[in-house]
Image (cartoon, helix red, strand yellow):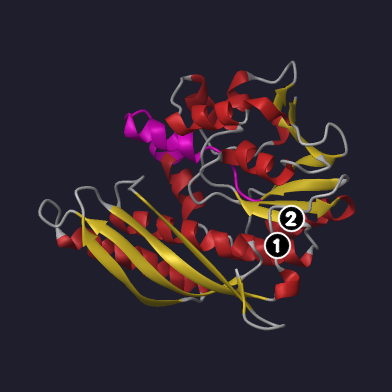
Amino acid sequence: MYRLDDERALIQTVDFFTPIVDDPYLFGRIAAANALSDVYAMGGRPLCAMNIVGFPVKTMDIEVLREILRGGLDALREAGAALAGGHTVEDAELKYGLSVTGLVHPGRVLTNRGARAGDRLVLTKPLGTGVVNTALKRGRASETDVAAAVASMTALNRRAAELIAAAGARACTDVTGFGLGGHLCEMIEGADAGAVVSAGALPLLPGAREYAREGLMPGGLHRNREFRAGMTDVADGVPADLADLLFDPQTSGGLLAAVPGPRAEDLVAALREGGVPGAAVVGEVVAEPAGRLVLAP
C-alpha cells in the first residue's frame, strides 16, 4: 500500500499461475478473480490492472490466449476496473495473471492483523478447490462437483468485501494458497489472541470430503499442514478429512474476516442475501491459548 494523501492510498498486488481448468476462458476469469481478491481483502476498490502472460506460442494455438484474456477482461469489467495493458513472454508453460492497482481510504484499510478476543470468524466461500482440482486432474471428479468449484472460483469477492467493511471487521484476509488454516495462523501469529475453528461449521464444496477421504489431495495441502504444525492443535473427535481440508490450498477463495461477535450472524445473513451463499461463521478469536489455532469438533 502506498499512501497518496489523507484521503487516498494505492493498493498494488500481483498474482499469476498455471491453468487449473481446461477451459481457457474460465481459466482467465478465475485468475483475474484471484488477483482482484487481494485488493478486496484490504477493503479497497480495484481501479485498473495489467495482464501478465507466459505463453508457449510454438506449441499452442493463439486462440487459447485470446480466450484467456477475454475471460480476464470480463472479470475486470464485472469489478468495474480497467485493463491498462500488460506484458507477454514466450514460455514453455502457460501462465496467466494480473497486476492490480486499487484505491482505499488510509483510515479504512483492512489487514490480516488486529483480531481481538471475542471476535467471530466469518468465511465467505466454501473450501475444497484444491482437492476438487486434484480430483479433476486425476480424472476422478464429477462434472457437477467441478462446476460448483468453478462457480466459486470465478465469483468475485466484491460484494463480500463491501459487507465485511460495513460490519466493522477488525481484520481480513483472502484465503488462497496457504489454506484457511495457514492464513488464520498468519492472523494470530505473535498476537495476544488465538483462534478456535469448528470443523463442523466449515462450508465445503460438493465432493470435497469424498476426495479428501480418497487421498486426492494436492501437495500444497501437506506442506501447509507441516509448516503450521507447531501452532495448530486438532482436538479429539475431529475427522481426519476435515483436519486436512483446513489446510487445502485455495484458488480464488473467499475472504476470512474477524468481526465483533454481536455483528457476525447479521453479517452472514447479509452476505447470503447479497449473493454470497457460502458465507458462514466458522470460529472465534479467543484470549487463550494466544498465538495458537485449535480445530475443534
Query: Residue 225: which numbered mark, if any?
Result: none
Q: Is residue 182 magenta?
A: no
Which residue is under mark 2?
Answer: 171
- The vertical placement of 114 against 146, above or below, is below
User: How many C-alpha atoms fall within 10 Å of the one at disc 1: few (<14), some, or many (≥20)?
Assistant: many
Query: Residue 110: which numbered mark, if any?
Result: 1
Q: Is residue 137 magenta?
A: yes
The boundaries of the magenta stretch are 124-145
Instruction: Report the residue at 57% width, 65% height from top.
Output: 39
- The vertical placement of 56 against 288, above or below, is below
Looking at the image, do the residues carrying marks 2 and 1 touch, with CB atoms under 8 Å apart? yes
Q: Position of residue 96 (x, y in %)?
A: 33, 57
The image quadrant where one finds the N terminus is: bottom right
Q: How many marks?
A: 2
Instruction: Report the residue at 78% width, 44% height from top.
Output: 191
Q: Position of residue 16 (x, y in %)?
A: 39, 55
Q: Earlier in the sequence, mark 2 or mark 1?
A: 1
Amino acid identity at mark 2: Ala
Q: Position of residue 151 (x, y in %)?
A: 48, 51
Q: Secondary structure at mark 2?
A: strand
The answer to whether 167 appears left or right of 30 in the picture is right
Residue 218 visible = no
Quarter of the view holding residue 188: top right
Amino acid identity at mark 1: Leu
